[in-house]
Amino acid sequence: MGGGRSVRAWARGALLASALTAVVMLVSTASALAVSGTPINIGTPYESEHLSVAVDSTGTAYIAWANEKDLAPVTTNIVQYCVLPVGATGCTHSGTLVPADSGQYIDGVQVLADGSTVVVLADVYGTGGSKSLEYIPEQEWQSTDGGATFVLINGGKSVAEGNVEGDTFPLSAVVLPGAEVLGYGWNSAVAPPTFHEFPLNLPPECSEETGKCPSGFAKLEPETNPDPITNGGGQFASQLGASPGVLGIFNTLFNKGGPLECPGGEFGTAYTYGSGVQSATNNYNLSPGEPNSAWKVSASQADCSVEYPAVAGGPSGFGVLEDNLATNDIVYHRFDQATETFDTPFAIIAAKAFEEEPSVSQDAYGGIYATFLLGGVGSPIDLAYSSDGGATWAGPSALNPDTDEDAKDLTSSVGSHGQGWAAWADKGSIYAQQFVASDAVSPVIATPPAADTLTTSQTAGTTTGASITVPAGTLGETDRATLSGVNAAIATGTVTYGLFSNPSCTASSEVFSGGTVAVTAGSAAPSAAVTTALAQGTYFWEATYSGDAHNRASTSACGSEVLTVVPATSLEGKGTSTSTTVTLTITCTSTPCTVTVTITIPESSGKAAAARKKKAKRPKIVTLATGKFTITTPGAHKLTLHLTKAGKQLFARDHGRVKAKVLVAEKTAGGLETTTRTVSFTPATTQPKSTK
């Protein structure tokens, strides 16, 4: 990640490699037989550079790289991509993205998955039109159909800007905390590292032609620092949700006596940190120290005697994987966001080992996944996993033994549910391989599977809980299972969901099948959503776990979750009347609601009524009043309806005292729900105000 290795680093690698060779080969041979995926050849470019991979919430990987076709007569570089769903054996979508304005060179490729939008960014230069600088440095493509098609944004005009004073190089792009915003880090040979925030949708032109992007960019190190971080490499990671922020990490090797110099001028790292959601008053485009800047720490010393870092953020917080040169261990260093420093101890991933080309990422539950070449260039591709925020680690275990010793440009990423994908180049081809947390554990099981506890959490709308009440007509209720136990963090297998009308969850009482879903890192995907409105009553979820080599099968406690379906509306049994109106009281279980009220009574007097009674025919139904109302707030509401002509006559005849049938109809997601009740109307003591 930081260019060429020093002589000392190479010497260290050679010494450790000889000691590790036997161990690594043993681990590789065993682990390679047990991993969840196998290598897939996804492309054979002329010469690949700048591999990048992003994984969405479904576990689908989007992989892109620069195909450098510097072979006469064609010299224009292109971006190629491949889309790989879980379990794929080949690309479901693939294609070529051609830089606009005849861009001849690509200096970096990044892929981001921001919700349902996939973004490909390429650092392009060597454009050839009359307005060539409009297309430099960053061109962007987007896909909103799962990678089936990509659209060039701004017609190819640059969407992001860094400090382009000399030999600018892109570091990494991130999805920023906030509403659909992206960020890009840059480095220059002659200027401080920079960071540029820009919107996902309708980004402005930010090119060399305009001189400066309207939003500007942040310089992350003072110009006066005698240890200028230049093109030594770097990487950024973002963290959404709780404790949002961005952490950048840079390689250092200084001997000028500045604040970023390690003792003896040894290898080290510097960091920069910003926190909060992107906004005008918390702006990632403003340099540290400026008013309203999101950056809380400008470039500062992180660790000394370390090399080959990779940074990640997520529910477990930020952290950096790196080689500890002082102890010859692969370590993980957690970042303390409260103090905005690396004041935590190192956690050892692998003792007396070293790595190169590391990548670190987190799933939605805080599981941390690290891939790297264990032993440096030519070594196996390994995976390590932590379920406790990086304090302890499972693995490393080989995903691919790299028997030809030619794997390079390794990178990886995981989706929110723990489905990971690694990508690398090997002898002119691009390969990809899926993985999950359990691949970091040796397949040799010394003990029987451990017992687990399976708990569930149901959701209806925005409500989650063990006991939920919903109105009739509701759709979309789901359940979600989580395992807890000794080996839960590496659990795989499946969970099957069911919704039952009996608290014993007998098979005959199942009213809805929630389907079977995969388990990753102890957590299952949610059940399918209820698609047919349930009848009024009480229901109970149950989830059944299949078990795996490390975990016993288990079932959640039936009755631990109660879903109660109640009428959509309720009516009071008494109402009032005047000579022209009637008033009754209605409560909607869920608001806002729109109801249609109809009040009827059988015709019980007159010649026509007597004739029907004599012939045993149904009596004629007389409509006394109708009305449509929208109720926006919870609680009981008095609704007033105007009497029909027949209704006025009947109420006048009976002196305002009538027992009538009231029908309330409400249109819901599950269809039309009705409630009926006989209401006794008596004369009102005061004239009610009419409601239309």
Image: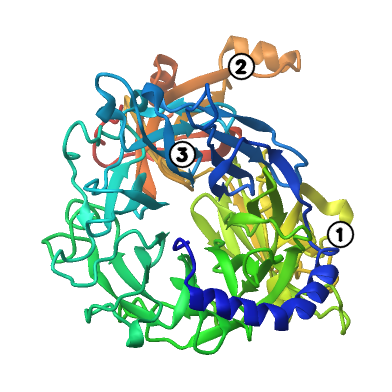
Label 2 – label 3 distance at C-alpha = 67 Å
Badge number at residue 119: 3
Mark 2 belongs to which amino acid? Lys
Q: Nearer the viewer, mark 1 or mark 3?
A: 3
Q: Earlier in the sequence, mark 1 or mark 3?
A: 3
Q: Nearer the viewer, mark 2 or mark 3?
A: 3
Task: Work out whether residue 232 or residue 222 is closer to the camera in this orientation and state it.
Answer: 232
**Tags 1 and 2 touching, CB below 8 Å:** no
Residue 341 occupies quadrant? bottom left
Q: Residue beneath label 1, please?
A: 506
Q: Is residue 474 visible?
A: no
> Residue 19, percent across and down?
71, 84
Badge 3 density bin: few <14, some 14–19, many ≥20, Cα 10 Å: many
> Residue 128, percent across and down?
33, 23
Q: Nearer the viewer, mark 1 or mark 2?
A: 1
Mark 3 belongs to which amino acid? Val
| Residue drawn 49% across the image and 32% down it | 77
Q: Secondary structure at mark 3?
A: strand
Image-based side of 454 in relation to 53, left or right? right
Residue 542 occupies quadrant? bottom right
**Tags 2 and 3 touching, CB below 8 Å:** no
